Image (cartoon, rainbow, N blue to C red):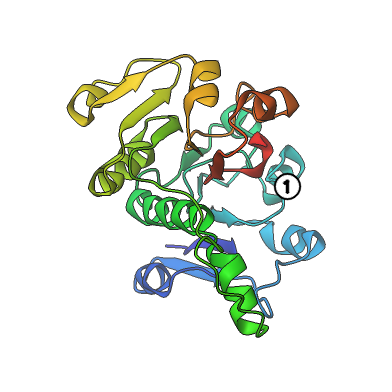
Amino acid sequence: MSLTRVLIVNRSYPSAGLELLKGNSRIQATVLPYEDYEPQSLKEIKQSVKGVDGLIWNTRYRLTGEILDIAGPQLKAISSTSSGLDHIDLEEVKKRNIRLGNTPGVLNDAVADIAVGVMIAAARRFKEGIRNLESGEWKYGVTWTLGQDIVGSTVGIVGLGGIGQAIVRRLKGFDVARFIYSGRSEKPEAKTLNVERVPQEQLLRESDYVILACPLTSETRNMINCTALRTMKKTAVLVNIGRGGKC
């Protein structure tokens, strides 16, 4: 029986996953080499992809119909160690009846931790304080780099999915006065978490902290434009934990 050839196009693939693949005697797993976390060149990827049965694809390059054609008709499965799939041409994958997998929800807690951390750092001006401390320009004053309160604030979350809900749970201990969210549909978890659904324009207008926790789609691309920024409070903190195309 011939081996199933799997090509890993990923700058830094988790060792546990690689060991799992290499521990299967029926799989021949190959990781494209890289240096200093620089992504492989597209030319190198095209040279390596021909004849593989499976692809693990996480790179800055978009997986297009051209690359799928080079891979060949024996390609049966593609996996992405990500929640979003905007780096893969879904129509081309579907056209070829290739199975596609991703990892939604796996990093919900980690991303929520980062969202809250970034929010606190911006509110309390951590970066400015650290920069001045490192440069020796510490100028003590009662209100210097004081920042603004999270206690008593209104936190608006665009997209109350798994990550958005995890953010709310973490912020409950900060005595936030009000949580609001916007989204295409009602979330049953919102009632339990005491989060009110409002139109997006209202969320932008009333929030002290705006957190973008929604996927990048045709509807959310460039959602934070000049009009949105003018709608927000001048003191508002904006945190985007998703794709950059939303801003």
Q: Is residue 11 visible?
A: no
User: As drawn, is 16 to the left or to the right of 89?
Assistant: left
Q: Position of residue 48 (x, y in %)?
A: 70, 64
Lateral position of residue 206 relative to residue 9, left or right: left
Q: Which image quadrant for residue 162?
A: top left
Image coordinates for residue 186, horizontal then vertical, percent? 33, 15
Q: Nearer the viewer, residue 109 or 69?
A: 109
Determine the residue positioned at 65% across, 43% down: 244
Q: Is residue 106 visible?
A: yes
Q: Nearer the viewer, residue 44 or 124?
A: 124
User: Which residue, as the protein is rendered here, is positioned at the far right?
Assistant: 43
Which amino acid does the dot numbered 1 rest on? Ile
Considering the numbered disc 1 on the image, is that residue within a helix, a strand or a loop? helix
In the picture shown, does residue 225 fall above or below 70?
above
Q: Identify the residue at horizontal 44%, vertical 31% (top origin).
A: 156
Q: Residue 87: x, y in percent?
A: 64, 43
Whether residue 109 is situated above or below residue 16 in the rendered picture = above
Task: Report how many numbered discs are placed on residues in the image.
Answer: 1
The residue at which mark 1 appears reads as 67
Crowd tier of the residue under label 1, counting other residues whose Cα lies within 10 Å: few below 14, some 14–19, many 20 or above: some
Residue at (33% x, 38% y) in the render = 152
Image coordinates of residue 188 in percent, x first then y, are 24, 20
Q: In this rendering, is residue 217 above or below 45? A: above
Viewer-closest of 149 and 168: 149
In the rendered image, the quadrant that contains the C terminus is: top right
Please identify the residue farthest to the left as the structure is shown.
192
**Residue 175 in which image quadrant:** top left
State the quadrant of the N terminus: bottom left
Which residue is at 35% across, 51% downward?
A: 106
